[in-house]
Amino acid sequence: MDVRGLEPAVPPEPVLITEAQPSLAAQHAARKKRYALTMGIRAVCLIFAAVFYQTVWLMLVLAVLGTVLPWIAVIMANDGPPKKRVDPHRYTHRPDRELEGPRPTRVIDG
């Protein structure tokens, strides 16, 4: 039976064999991305606060968000790696994928 037809079309994720954290460069890049996203949301809040100046309560909410978000962005950017635990793709033993061991040989003494 041809086993190739049973493989998924997308190659599976590589198996993680270490408990090491992401590199410092990867952590820094993730923090920069989070900071830029937060500051982008701040800019949008300030623009919408200017657009909705006639609706005072909405303008105030958006202006407060635009004022507080830089502080939140700096706190998040200076934080370490994310605290959530991601369950990586780890090796799981599957007996149906084992290679066959050596077959016992018959020994004839005599």
Image (cartoon, helix red, strand yellow):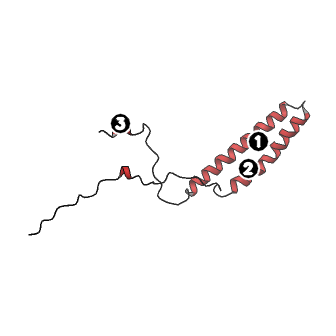
| Rendered location of residue 32, percent (x, y) | 65, 49
Callout 3, which amino acid? Gly
Callout 1, which amino acid? Arg
| Rendered location of residue 82, percent (x, y) | 64, 54
Quarter of the image that includes the C terminus: bottom left
Does 101 sit left or right of 92 as displayed?
Answer: left
Callout 2, which amino acid? Ala
Q: CA distance from mark 2 to mark 1?
A: 9 Å
In the image, residue 13 above or below residue 55: below
Q: CA distance from mark 3 to mark 2?
A: 49 Å
Residue denoted by label 3? 5
Task: Looking at the picture, tell me which residue is in the foreground, 78 or 15.
Answer: 15
| Rendered location of residue 44, percent (x, y) | 76, 36
Residue denoted by label 2? 73
Residue shown at 45%/49% (left/top)? 14
Residue found at the very far left of the displayed protein: 110
Task: Looking at the picture, tell me which residue is in the foreground, 38 or 5.
Answer: 5
Q: Which circle, 3 or 2, is nearer the viewer?
A: 3
Label 2 crowd bin: few (<14), some (14–19), many (20+), radius 10 Å: many
Residue shown at 17%/62% (left/top)? 106
Residue denoted by label 1? 42
Which is more N-terminal, label 1 or label 2? 1
Quarter of the image that includes the N terminus: top left
Please, what secondary structure does the residue beneath circle 2 have?
Answer: helix
Is disc 2 in contact with disc 1, using a CB cutoff of under 8 Å? yes
Please, what secondary structure does the residue beneath circle 3 have?
Answer: helix
Which is more N-terminal, label 3 or label 1? 3
Does 56 sit left or right of 103 as displayed?
Answer: right
